[in-house]
Structures are given as C-alpha cells and as structure tokens.
C-alpha cells in the first residue's frame, strides 16, 4: 500500500502534475455543459421542423436541409468533424479559441442526436392532442408549443439526460486539436513521467465517477417521472 501511495505522489504531486487533471477536468465540464445546451436548442429546432413536415407536409425545404444535416453529422465520426472545424473552417482563429471550436463541434454533433430523440417524442404524442388544440381555437404553432412539446419533453427527458452522459465521454477526443481536456491532461502527465498506467487510471476513474453520478441522477429523474405519471 505504501508503494502505491508513493507512486501516486511521484506521478501526480511532483511538479504539481495534478493540476493538469484539474484544468483538464474544468475544460471538459465547460465543453460538456455548453455543448449540451447548444445541442438541445439545435435539436429541438430540427425536431420541430421535421415533425411539422411529417404531420402537415409543410417546410419541405427546411426538412430537406435538416435531413442533410442529420445524415452528414450522424454518418461521420465525431473526431473527424472536430478536426474539420478546427483545421479547415476555423483555421484562421488563434489557438486560444480552441475551447469555442470544441464547444461548437460537440454541440452541433449532439444536436443531430437530440433532434431524433425529440422528434420521436413528438411523433409519439397522439394526434388527438392536435385535434384537441384545434378545437380550443389554437393554431398549429400554439398547439405544438403549449400542448405537444411539454408532453414530448417529459417523455424524452431521460433519453436527453443519457445523451449528456454520452457527450461527456465523447469530449475525450478534444485533444486531437490540442485542447487540454481531461484526457489530454493525463497524456501530458504520461509524457512527463514515461508512465502510462497511473495517469490513464486516474483519467478513467474520474470519467467513471462523473458517469456514475450522472447515471444516478438520471435514475432518480426517471423514478420521479414514473411517480408523477401514477398520480
């Protein structure tokens, strides 16, 4: 046990190498939270356009563009999208904007998956709800905003929470553009110590702890929603 503790000190305490993990964790959380917000907003917009087209036949051009977006984003690897954003689209930006590029890349990617989650929630709502809104004198837009979306959001909330968990783990590829995220912090320690086991174990443990916490919160959310439905 004493040898293990000495190994920890040698790997992380010497030269304050633990700070790489702390900074990396902070960047990972910032990217995850901001990208999740972008993904949710973008996903809802795309889902509403696509579901409106499916139900009314309107917004054909918008639906066509959304389908292209979904096909491209869901059909290409996240790391390739990230590198295209950084080395091609935002190639002229200063390196200090790496975190912004990462947020946009992961947010746009997440939006494609959120869109399909939300669209499935909207399409699962019975058409009678639209008819009820129409009978109350509500337009299609008001029916969607005040009747359909609240029900769909409640139905897909656990799935959206799971998407955030997936997004958190996907940010581990941010190091491909030199972003000092949690995984990159572990790589820096590994390069300095010439030891792979302890830095990688620490990174894996931190990710695992965060995922366990988020999974627990999602489980509590699902149980609370189930109780509300029984009332």
Image: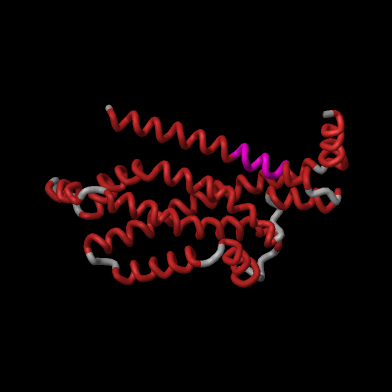
Query: Residue placed at 39% from the left, 66% from the top?
Result: 66
**Quadrant of res 12:** top right
For residue 185, above or below residue 72: above
Image quadrant holding the C terminus, namely: top left
**Quadrant of res 79:** bottom right
Query: Residue placed at 31% from the left, 47% from the top?
Result: 149
Between 218 and 55, the one lying in front of the other is: 218
Q: Position of residue 132 (x, y in %)?
A: 15, 46
Find the magenta span and give its range: 202-210
Q: Count the numbered circles shown.
A: 0
Q: Main secondary structure of the magenta part?
A: helix
Q: Is residue 54 magenta?
A: no
Q: Position of residue 46 (x, y in %)?
A: 38, 59
For residue 82, above or below residue 162: below
For residue 195, above or below residue 175: above
Tell me which colouring the rendered structure shows.
Answer: secondary structure
Determine the residue located farthest toward the left in the rendered image: 135
Q: Position of residue 76 (x, y in %)?
A: 53, 67
- In the rendered view, does 69 fall on the left or right side of 13? left
- In the rendered view, does 210 fall on the left or right side of 19? left
């Amino acid at each position: 046990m004493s040898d293990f503790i000495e190994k920890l000190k040698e790997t992380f305490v010497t030269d304050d190498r633990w700070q790489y993990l702390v900074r990396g964790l902070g960047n990972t959380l910032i990217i995850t939270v901001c990208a999740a917000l972008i993904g949710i907003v973008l996903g809802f917009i795309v889902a509403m356009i696509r579901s409106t087209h499916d139900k009314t036949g309107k917004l054909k051009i918008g639906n066509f563009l959304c389908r292209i977006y979904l096909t491209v984003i869901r059909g290409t690897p996240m790391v390739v999208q990230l590198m295209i954003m950084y080395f091609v689209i935002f190639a002229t930006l200063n390196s200090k904007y790496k975190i912004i590029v990462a947020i946009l890349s992961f947010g746009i990617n997440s939006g494609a998956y959120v869109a399909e989650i939300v669209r499935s929630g909207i399409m699962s709502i019975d058409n009678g709800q639209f008819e009820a809104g129409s009978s109350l004198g509500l337009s299609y837009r008001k029916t969607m905003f005040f009747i359909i979306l609240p029900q769909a959001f409640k139905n897909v909330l656990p799935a959206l929470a799971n998407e955030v968990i997936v997004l958190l783990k996907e940010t581990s590829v941010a190091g491909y553009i030199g972003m000092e995220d949690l995984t990159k912090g572990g790589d820096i320690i590994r390069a300095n110590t010439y030891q792979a086991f302890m830095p990688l174990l620490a990174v894996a443990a931190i990710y695992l702890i965060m995922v366990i916490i988020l999974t627990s919160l999602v489980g509590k959310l699902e149980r609370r929603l189930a109780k509300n439905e029984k009332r």
